[in-house]
Each structure stands twice: as structure tokens, then as C-alpha cells.
Image (spheres, rainbow, N blue to C red):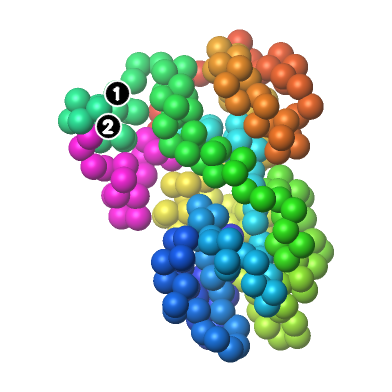
Amino acid sequence: MRRVFNIGSDTLEIPRIRVQGTRNEDQIPDKGRAVIVNWDSAFSDGLLDRPDLRGLHMIRDPRDVLISGMRYHQIAPEAGEKALHIPRKEFGGDTYQQHLNGLPTLHDKMLFEMENMHLRTLTQMTAWRYDRPNIREVRYETLMQDHDMAMFAEILDFLGFAGRDKDTILEIYWANSLFGGMKEKSDRPRRVALHIQSGEAAQWVTKLPRSVAEIYADRHGQALIDLGYETDTSWVNRCPDSVELTPTTS
């Protein structure tokens, strides 16, 4: 999604402003279009309440976020991921990545990720207001089934893209989707390939060990319910007793 709107705004020559709370809001033009982004959903209430703003907010099943994050943080390069490569006192001078890679079992790695990077992401997801009429809410799992792009086309209508501009964004969307132009691993740029192992939805059913699932349900089961992914904690019973620790490669 980042690539779609980065490439799309560049192609259509629409200013793109990355904000962090109120930081950089003074760069938003008074008139005309602008693409305003923050990949942690850290927008100010003042910006979100603007009557001329239309937004897109996407979430993913937190259990899959945990699995994906744990894997990626073991191999993420320093470029673009500096926080993972800073020596930290609480890890005995190791970086986040070094500490994660040094843990002996998959259970240990997932628990560490759950208590650190994942907790930050989950907190952002649960703190978000999901009732704003000018923000279109969508789930990763739903978009992954949108192979004819009908849903994304409707989202672009909502965001105000029309005519040739809309067609351009749709072409970029298809070219960068995991069911379109990036379906084959060999077609993915290196950084995208590092992020993505399969991109499938509900990976937790086969890749989240029961021992981790039980802890997750105890700590964050209500968050899954609040986000609409579950109605109780019985999902734990669907998780495998054990999962093989597969090597990661950069």
C-alpha cells in the first residue's frame, strides 16, 4: 500500500507529505490535492476532523502481524529500519535484531516480539477511532480477496480519484499487489521480498504455536474481539501444538 500511494502520488504529481502528529502539517497546501501519510496512523485529531479530508485506514489480523513482524525483524536491513540496529542497554548492549536472533526457540522469539514491537503496533490499532465518516476502514484480509479490484476502485472513488487518475492508481495497485504484478517472488523488489514470506491471510492457524497463542489470548484476547477478529478465545484451539523454527535469510 505504501508503494501504491508513493508511486501514485509521484506519477500524478500530487504533493505527498509524511506527518507525525502535527509535525509537517504546515507543509499541507491550502488548496488543491495532497497525499498525507503516516504508516503508524499517527495523525492529529485536527487533521482527521478536516471536512475536506478523505482517508484510508487498513489493519491486519494482529496474530498475523506478530508472525510477520517477528520474521521480518530478524532480517530487516539497517536502511529504513534503524531502530532495530541501535545497541540498547536493556539488551546488554545488543540491538533489537541481535537480541531477537539470539533467542533459542520460536516461542522465545515470538514472546519477545509480542512484548516489544508488536505491543506498540497493537496499541496503535486499538487506540484508533473507527467511527470517522471521512475515513474508509478496510482489512488486509478483505483486500487480499479483491482480485478484480472492485473494492479498491470504490475506495478510490471515496478518496476522490476519478477518470484517468483513478485508472493510473488502479494500474499501480495491480502492479504492486500480491495477486497481480508481485504474485511471483522473483518479481518483488528486494525490500518487498524481505517483508513478505507468503502474504496469505490467517497464517496464525498453522504458524502460531499453541504455547504462544495461549499467552496471546490471555494478554490480548480482548483486543482481537474489539477489532472484530474474534468473538471469544476459543481460536486458541485451532493453533498447532508445535511449529518448526525455520531459518530466515536476508
Residue extending farthest left = 93
Q: Specify whether residue 67 is painted magenta.
A: no
Residue 161 drawn at (x, y percent): 71, 79
Snapshot quadrant of residue 246: top left
Residue at image location 65% in from the left, 67% down from the top = 49
Residue 45 drawn at (x, y percent): 58, 61
Residue extending farthest bottom = 31
Residue 231 drawn at (x, y percent): 79, 27
Q: Is residue 238 above or below residue 69?
A: above
Q: How many marks?
A: 2
Residue at image location 49% in from the left, 34% down from the top = 119
Residue nearer the viewer, 48 or 14: 48
| Helix, strand or loop at mark 2 | helix
Quadrant showing the C terminus:
top left
Residue tagged by mark 1?
102
Other-residue count near label 1 (Cα within 10 Å), few / some / many at <14 / 14–19 / ≥20:
few
Residue at image location 42% in from the left, 18% down from the top = 108
Structural distance between the alpha carbons of marks 1 and 2: 6 Å
Snapshot quadrant of residue 148: bottom right
Identify which amino acid the numbered label 2 is placed on: Gln
Q: Specify whether residue 85 is painted magenta.
A: yes
Residue at image location 31% in from the left, 45% down from the top = 83
State which region is magenta. Answer: 72-88
Residue 38 drawn at (x, y percent): 50, 60
| Residue 120 visible to the viewer | yes
Q: Is residue 95 above or below residue 151?
A: above
Identify which amino acid the numbered label 1 is placed on: Gly
Q: Is residue 182 above or below residue 244?
A: below
Other-residue count near label 2 (Cα within 10 Å), few / some / many at <14 / 14–19 / ≥20:
some
Residue tagged by mark 2?
98
Q: In the rendered view, does 250 fall on the left or right side of 188?
A: left
Residue nearer the viewer, 231 or 68: 231
